[in-house]
Amino acid sequence: MTQKKLIIFMPSIEGGGVEKNLFIVTNYLSNKIDNLTVITASYKYKKKFNKKINLIFPQKKIWNELGRRLKYLVCLILLIKFLLKNKNSAVFAFQANLYCVIVCKLLSIKIIIRSNSAPEGWSRNIIKKYLYKSIINKADKVMVNSHDFKKSMKKKFDVNCKVIYNPLNNIEIKKKSKTKIKNLYPKKTIKIINVGRFVDQKDQITLLKSLNLIKDKINFHLILMGRGILKKKLTHYISVNNLKKNITFINFKKNPYPYIKQSDLFVLSSKFEGLPNVLLEAIVLKKFIISSNCPTGPREILLNGKAGYLFSVGDFKQLSKKILLFSKNSTKVNNSFVRKAFNSLKRFDYDANLNNYLNLVKSIM
C-alpha cells in the first residue's frame, strides 16, 4: 500500500506562537514525507512554506482578510473536497479541531489534533465542554505541548495526550536578535517588555495596573508589542493614569527578538496559554522573566518559580511586588534565575522535538 498523503490543516494563520511552530514543523515534515499538503485561507503566508509543499487556498484571496470562523468554513469545504478525491490520506489539525475530527470520522480518515490553549481558558461553557469531550476522544491522536496541559486535558476530558515540546531554534533566535534597531528605552530605567496580542487572554491590563501602583517607586519604561481589539482600552488606561511617558506601543513584528534583547525584564500576564513560545525566546536571550502562573506552561518553563517569578493570574498587586523585588535584587541574584532558566532549555531541543513530531505523524500513516 502506498504511503498516505498528509494534510496539515490551519485555516487562519495570524502570526503568533502556534504559527511559528506550524511553519517549523510543516517544513521539517515536508523533507521527510512525500505528498504533504497544507490547507489554509491565509494566502499571504505562502512564502513561509517549503516550495515542495502542496498549498491549497480558496480561489478568491479576499478570504485571507475575513474572520477566523469564515476561514474555518471555507477551509473545511476544501478539506472535504480533497479527502473525497484522496481517501488514502491522514490529517494533522492545528486549528478547528472539533470540526476536523467530525469530518475525518465521517470519511473514515485518521486524524491527529494539536490542542493549542489550556482548557481552563475556554471550557466554562457547559455545552461547549460537553461537545468537546464527546468529540475529542474520537481523534486518533491528541497532542499538547506541556505536561501540565496533558494533566488538564486528562482531568477535564478524560483524554490521553501525547506531549511534544515546542522545537526551539536557539541559533535562529540569537541571529535575528542581532538585527540593528533604534534604542527605544530611556536611559537609567528598568526596561520592561510584553509581547502578545491585545486581547482578553493576554491580560495586559493587569500589567498596567501593577506598574501604576509602583510608578512613584521605580523608574521604568514598558514596551507593549502587539495588536488587537483591546488596544483602545489599554491606551485609555495609560492616559487616565498619566503613564504615557512610561509606555511605548509597538505594532506586531515578525522579528521581535532585537526588542526583547534591549529589555531587562520580560513580563507575561496571560490568563491561559498552551506553552508560551515567547517565554522560551526570552530565555534564549537571557532575560529575567516574571509570568502569571496561568494554565498551562509558565510554571513548567520556569521550574515552578526557580527560574523566574510567578504571580497569580490577574493579581496586579502581587505582580507589582515581584517587579519591585526584581528591581531591588542584586545583578548576581537576578542572573542566578536567568542561568537556571537557560540551562533548562535542553527539554526544548530543536531536532529532538521535530523528530517526535515525525514519529507521531508516522503512527497514523
Image (tube, rainbow, N blue to C red):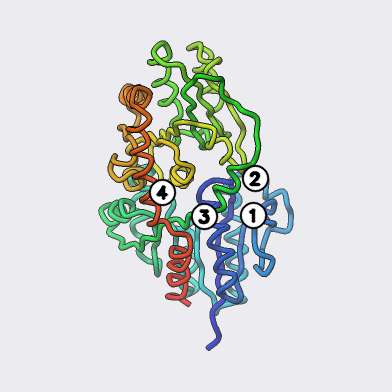
Q: Residue at x 31, y 61 (%)?
A: 159
Residue nearest the viewer, comparing 327 with 203? 327
Q: Residue 108's spot in the image, x, y percent? A: 47, 75
Residue position marked by numbered label 4 in the rendering = 275
Residue nearest the viewer, comparing 89 with 220? 220
Pointers 2 and 1 in contact (CB under 8 A)? yes
Q: Is residue 277 visible?
A: yes
Q: Nearer the viewer, mark 3 or mark 2?
A: 3
Q: Residue 335's spot in the image, x, y percent? A: 37, 36
Task: In the rendered structure, find residue 30 and report the number of the disc placed on it.
Answer: none
Residue position marked by numbered label 3 in the rendering = 169
> Which amino acid, mark 3?
Asn
Q: Residue 233's spot in the image, x, y percent? A: 52, 23
Task: In the rendered structure, find residue 41 and report the number of the disc placed on it.
Answer: 1
Residue nearest the viewer, comparing 339 with 86? 339
Residue position marked by numbered label 2 in the rendering = 66
> Which amino acid, mark 1?
Ala
User: Outermost residue, right direction?
Assistant: 60
The image quadrant that residue 315 belongs to is: top left
Vertical order, 127 against 311 (above or below): below
Vertical order, 317 against 34 (above or below): above
